[in-house]
Structure formats: structure tokens, C-alpha cells
Image (cartoon, rainbow, N blue to C red):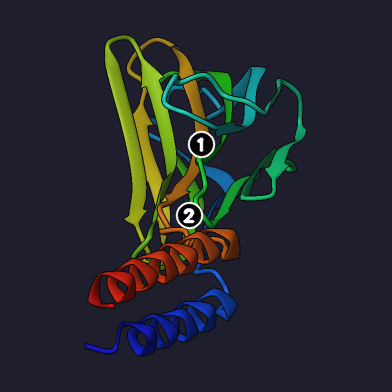
């Protein structure tokens, strides 16, 4: 067997592979909830009460984070509690979340062998609903994603209302490359007394890629050198 020929052929194949660009998984997921509004319905036109929904005590959670390892601790991380945007980025991905003008959004991108990135935005208010009134809160949720088989991407958009022991929500969720949009709505009503609770909107986008790294040229060089030694030893034994 011609070991010199085999080693030479293998070396050329490895050098050709080393010259090829590395494989990088890429993924993107975005979630938005916009057009937040509400409609009121008078359930008793003869009670002399004008239907009303009062929103107070706004509360915001706008967060973006990267998770570099399995400890569960984010680094980098950016969190704000006022209207605006939170953002983090590294050479393998990014996350951005924001709240502005009754709209929330979140977007995450990943590439290569990326750690997990996540973006979350929640805006909520205390509400007071007049007696004998029904409220329909609405918003337009939209999810968009692109990814390869090496990237796991997911997220959601949600509209919610909570009062007493009741929690109501309408949401959309998507995983991987699915795109989805929907008008979200939640309906609740008061009885003889004012109804108090919390309502709001939230979105989330997260992702992680798992691309297999292509060996560096130095690794190929070591493998080629090893094959050369094997071929040399084989020839010495045959001499």
C-alpha cells in the first residue's frame, strides 16, 4: 500500500476543508404588540353612570440579556423600568426590547455557537372600571422568525387583565421559523360596584444556536503532521 500517496491525498483534502468558511447557524425572532386600545360597553344605560376605564400606576419591565453558560446568570444584561429600550450585544448575538407609545417589542438574534439571548418587555397599569360596564381591550400581536436547524428560537405576544382571583389573557406563540399575527382581545365587566385590577401587554423573544465549529487550520496541520509520521514509520518497517 502506498502510504506516501495516501498521506499526500489526505493532506490535500484537509487543506481544502480548512480553506472553507466555518458553518454558522443564524437565527432571528421578533415579537411586537402595538395598537393598544379599548372599547367600553354600557351594560345599564339607565343607571346614570357614564362608562369609564381609568389607568394609573404604570409599571414597566424592559429587559435584554445574554446567558454565556449553564449557571443561569445573565451577562451582559440591561434592565430599565421606564419607557425606552434595553439592549445587549456580543459577537455571537444580541437582544433588544422596548416600550414606546403603548407598544412593546422584543427582538433577538443569534449566530455561530451562541449562548442564549432573551428580550422581554412588559407594560401594565392599575385599572378602575365603572359599575355596570364591560371593557374590551385590544392590541395587534405579530411574531416573525428566521432560523436554521441549528438555532432554537421562540417567543410570544400577550394581552392580559387580572382582578380578584381572575386572570384573563389572549396570546400568540411561535417556535423556530414560524410567523404569526393576530388581533388580541380580552373582555371583562363590572357588576354593581367598581372593578379594580391590573391590565397590560407583554412580549418575549429568545434564541440560542448550536452550530458545530469547523476545526481551525492549526488543528488540520497537527493531523497532517501525524499522518506523515505514520507513513514514515510504515516505510521504515517495510525497508
Q: Rounded to the nearest whole Å, what is the CA distance between mark 1 and mark 2?
A: 10 Å
Residue 25, can we see it? Answer: no
Residue on which the image places disc 2: 141
Helix, strand or loop status at disc 2? strand
Q: Residues within 10 Å of mark 1 (few under 14, many from 20)?
A: many
Name the quarter where the C terminus is drawn. Answer: bottom left
Name the quarter where the N terminus is drawn. Answer: bottom left
Helix, strand or loop status at disc 1? strand
Determine the residue positioned at 57% across, 45% down.
Answer: 37
Determine the residue positioned at 52% across, 47% down.
Answer: 114
- Left or right, residue 212 beside residue 130: left
Q: Is residue 23 above or below residue 99?
A: below
Q: Nearer the viewer, residue 49 or 94?
A: 94
Q: Residues within 10 Å of mark 2 (few under 14, many from 20)?
A: many
Q: Is residue 152 above or below residue 206?
A: below
Determine the residue positioned at 42% across, 47% down.
Answer: 155
Closer to the N terminus: mark 1 or mark 2? 2
Q: Which mark is residue 223?
A: none
Q: Give the tally of numbered discs.
A: 2
Q: Is residue 62 above or below residue 222?
A: above
- Left or right, residue 176 beside residue 62: left
Residue 209, can we see it? Answer: yes
Residue 127 on image: x %, y %? 54, 19
Residue 70 on image: x %, y %? 41, 26
Residue 103 on image: x %, y %? 64, 45
- Left or right, residue 119 beside residue 213: right
Residue on which the image places disc 1: 202
Q: Nearer the viewer, residue 114 or 51?
A: 114
Determine whether label 1 and label 2 are within 8 Å by CB.
Answer: no
Amino acid at each position: 500500500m502506498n502510504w506516501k500517496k495516501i498521506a499526500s491525498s489526505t493532506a490535500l483534502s484537509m487543506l481544502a476543508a480548512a480553506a472553507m468558511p466555518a458553518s454558522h447557524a443564524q437565527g432571528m425572532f421578533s415579537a411586537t404588540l402595538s395598537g393598544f386600545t379599548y372599547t367600553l360597553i354600557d351594560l345599564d344605560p339607565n343607571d346614570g353612570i357614564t362608562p369609564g376605564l381609568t389607568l394609573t400606576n404604570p409599571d414597566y419591565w424592559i429587559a435584554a440579556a445574554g446567558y454565556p453558560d449553564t449557571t443561569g446568570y445573565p451577562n451582559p444584561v440591561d434592565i430599565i423600568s421606564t419607557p425606552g429600550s434595553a439592549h445587549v450585544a456580543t459577537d455571537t448575538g444580541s437582544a433588544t426590547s422596548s416600550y414606546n407609545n403603548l407598544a412593546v417589542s422584543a427582538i433577538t438574534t443569534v449566530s455561530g455557537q451562541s449562548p442564549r439571548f432573551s428580550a422581554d418587555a412588559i407594560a401594565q397599569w392599575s385599572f378602575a372600571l365603572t359599575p355596570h360596564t364591560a371593557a374590551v381591550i385590544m392590541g395587534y400581536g405579530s411574531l416573525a422568525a428566521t432560523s436554521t436547524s441549528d438555532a432554537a428560537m421562540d417567543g410570544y405576544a400577550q394581552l392580559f387583565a387580572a382582578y380578584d382571583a381572575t386572570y384573563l389573557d389572549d396570546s400568540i406563540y411561535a417556535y423556530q421559523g414560524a410567523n404569526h399575527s393576530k388581533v388580541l382581545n380580552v373582555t371583562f365587566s363590572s357588576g354593581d360596584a367598581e372593578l379594580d385590577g391590573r391590565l397590560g401587554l407583554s412580549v418575549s423573544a429568545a434564541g440560542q444556536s448550536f452550530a458545530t465549529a469547523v476545526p481551525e487550520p492549526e488543528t488540520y496541520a497537527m493531523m497532517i503532521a501525524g499522518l506523515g509520521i505514520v507513513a514514515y514509520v510504515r516505510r521504515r518497517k517495510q525497508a
